[in-house]
Image: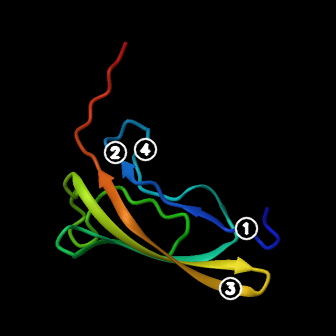
Amino acid sequence: MCFDNCPNFILPNIFTPNNDGKNDFFQALMPIKFINEIEITIFNRWGEPVYRSKDPYFTWNGNNIETNQPSPSGIYYFKCQVHTLRLSGIEQLELSGFLHLVRGTRTIKD
C-alpha cells in the first residue's frame, strides 16, 4: 500500500534491436508514473559512455552516441538518476545495473 505518490520507473535487463518490432529498444517499462526527469548513461565494458538521455521516455536503439554505429552484442552497465514527484517534493533515486544487448537473433516463422 502506498500513502504517497507511487513513482514507477522500471528498466529491463535485455533487448534485441533486430527490427522485428519486438523489444527493439532499451526503454523504461510502461507505465511511467510520477517521474519529473531522469539522467541515464549507458556504458560499454570499458566504461565508455555509449548512450545518454534526460528523457524518461527515452528509447535506445543500441547505436553508439559518438559514431551512430550499432554497438555489439554484450553486457552493458547503466546508471540512472530518477527525479521522482513525491508529496514532499522532488526526490532523487539512483538506479544502476546491467543490461544485455542481443543482436542477430532469428525468429522462427511457422
> Three-letter amino acid code at disc 2?
Thr
At x 22%, y 76%, the residue is 48
Specify which label sits upstream in the sequence, 4 or 1.
Answer: 1
Q: Within the image, what quadrant is residue 10 found in?
A: bottom right
Tag 1 secondary structure: loop
Q: Nearer the viewer, mark 2 or mark 1?
A: 1
**Which quarter of the image is occupied by the N terminus?**
bottom right
Name the residue located 44 percent from the left edge and 39 percent from the top edge. 22
State if disc 1 and disc 2 touch (CB < 8 Å): no
Q: Position of residue 103 (x, y in %)?
A: 24, 44
Mark 2: give few (<14), some (14-19) or many (20+) Cα within 10 Å.
Answer: many
* Whole-number angstrom distance, CA of label 3 to CA of label 2: 33 Å
- Residue under label 4, please give it: 23
Q: Nearer the viewer, mark 3 or mark 4?
A: 3
Instruction: Name which residue type carries label 4.
Output: Asn
Crowd tier of the residue under label 3, counting other residues whose Cα lies within 10 Å: few below 14, some 14–19, many 20 or above: some
Residue 6's disc number: 1
Instruction: Indicate which disc, 4 or 2, sits on the residue closer to the N terminus.
Output: 2
User: Which of the two discs, 3 and 2, labels the residue nearer the N terminus?
Assistant: 2
Image spot of residue 105 (x, y percent):
26, 36
Q: Residues within 10 Å of mark 1 (few under 14, many from 20)?
A: some
- In the displayed orientation, state which residue is furthest to the right: 3
Q: For this view, does 4 lie left or right of residue 35? A: right
Q: For mark 3, what is the residue?
A: 90
Circles 4 and 2: CB atoms closer than 8 Å: yes
Front residue of 47/107: it is 47
- Name which quarter of the figure residue 9 lies in: bottom right
* Furthest residue in direction bottom, as rendered: 89
User: How far across and how far down the image is residue 28, in percent?
Assistant: 52, 59
